């Protein structure tokens, strides 16, 4: 039964992490419905598969002309921009888990940013930056500060950084693609940080403690989000870009309202 619950969470992670609809909101609410604890460690672990999917999907953009000054400047912008969310996440991890996982906070966040997405979608796409490597240090850093807001469940890391990028002069879809790449250091670092904490607190488990069920669950947590994540990225590339933000905004508003209505049951 636990493996089935993990499978549901893993599929949800694969879809929701790579779309601006907040994976944390979906996982936390589903965890409450299925009565499975959505600890920070579990949430971070579910990100491993989707992180690999992002790396695979953007492989050429990330590693073409690898040994050039411009490419390494691009990497440094990403690393610099992740500092705000990394610091806040480490300092306030326990408070975020204790306080910000309430249903009403998730619902309000979903609805608020959903409305903003609809408003932004209906504005003319007059962004000047279309090539991600031409993003300035200032634009990248400010998108990094926006990414820190996504520590509030329901915000969506890709959603908030996309909106910030559009406001800073990036083309709408360029802002979305950069938002996915911008999150890579956090997505890679979070599971490592949580595993190191677990080792420090409980020690390194011996192989004799590992069961077949444990291996199956580990496979579900990593492989399923990767496969579903790849599918999500391929489908996202094929859909019309005229109203894509509005579509996600409407979905967020509906989901937020449903959580407010039925939240007392969770």
Image (cartoon, rainbow, N blue to C red):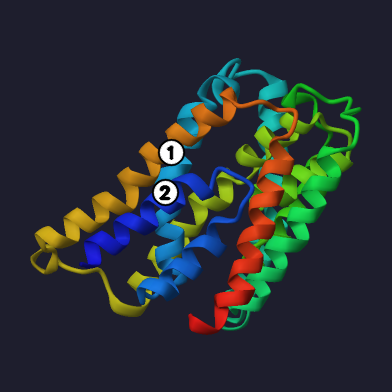
Residue under numbered circle 2:
48
Give 229 or 71, whichever is nearer the viewer. 229
Give 190 or 111, whichever is nearer the viewer. 111
For residue 78, what is the image quadrant?
top right
Give 179 or 16, whichever is nearer the viewer. 16
Question: Would you say 96 lies left or right of 111 here?
Answer: left
- Residue 225 seen: yes
- Residue 56 in the image: state x and y as whole percent: 45, 29
Question: Residue sitting at 59 percent across and 44 percent down?
Answer: 19
Residue under numbered circle 1:
52
Other-residue count near label 2 (Cα within 10 Å), few / some / many at <14 / 14–19 / ≥20: many
Question: Residue sitting at 31 percent across and 43 percent down?
Answer: 223
- Residue 123 in the image: state x and y as whole percent: 90, 37
Is 9 located above or below residue 14 in the figure? below
- Residue 199 in the image: state x and y as whole percent: 33, 70
- Residue 129 in the image: state x and y as whole percent: 84, 25
Give 247 or 120, whichever is nearer the viewer. 247
Tell me the distance, in whole angstroms, between the alpha carbons under discs 2 and 1: 6 Å
Is 195 located above or below residue 101 in the figure? above
Question: Would you say 14 lies left or right of 17 here?
Answer: left
Other-residue count near label 1 (Cα within 10 Å), few / some / many at <14 / 14–19 / ≥20: many
Question: Residue sitting at 36 percent across and 77 percent down?
Answer: 35
């Amino acid at each position: 039964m636990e493996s089935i619950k993990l499978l549901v969470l893993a599929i949800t992670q694969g879809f929701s992490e790579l779309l601006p609809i907040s994976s944390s909101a979906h996982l936390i609410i589903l965890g409450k419905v299925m009565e499975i604890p959505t600890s920070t460690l579990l949430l971070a672990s579910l990100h491993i598969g989707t992180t690999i999917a992002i790396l695979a999907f953007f492989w050429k953009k990330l590693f073409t002309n690898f040994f050039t000054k411009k490419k390494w400047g691009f990497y440094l912008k990403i690393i610099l921009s992740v500092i705000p969310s990394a610091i806040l996440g480490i300092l306030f991890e326990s408070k975020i888990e204790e306080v910000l996982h309430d249903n009403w906070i998730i619902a309000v966040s979903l609805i608020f940013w959903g409305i903003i997405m609809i408003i932004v979608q209906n504005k003319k796409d007059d962004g000047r930056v279309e090539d991600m490597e031409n993003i300035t240090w200032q634009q990248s850093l400010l998108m990094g500060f926006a990414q820190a807001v996504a520590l509030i469940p329901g915000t969506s890391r890709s959603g908030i950084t996309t909106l910030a990028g559009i406001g800073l002069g990036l083309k709408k879809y360029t802002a979305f693609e950069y938002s996915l790449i911008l999150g890579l250091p956090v997505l890679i670092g979070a599971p490592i940080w949580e595993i190191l904490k677990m080792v420090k607190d409980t020690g390194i488990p011996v192989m004799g403690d590992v069961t077949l069920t444990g291996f199956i669950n580990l496979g579900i947590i990593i492989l399923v989000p990767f496969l579903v994540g790849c599918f999500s990225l391929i489908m996202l590339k094929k859909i019309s870009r005229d109203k894509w933000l509005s579509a996600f905004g409407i979905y967020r508003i509906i989901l937020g309202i449903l959580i407010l209505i039925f939240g007392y049951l969770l």
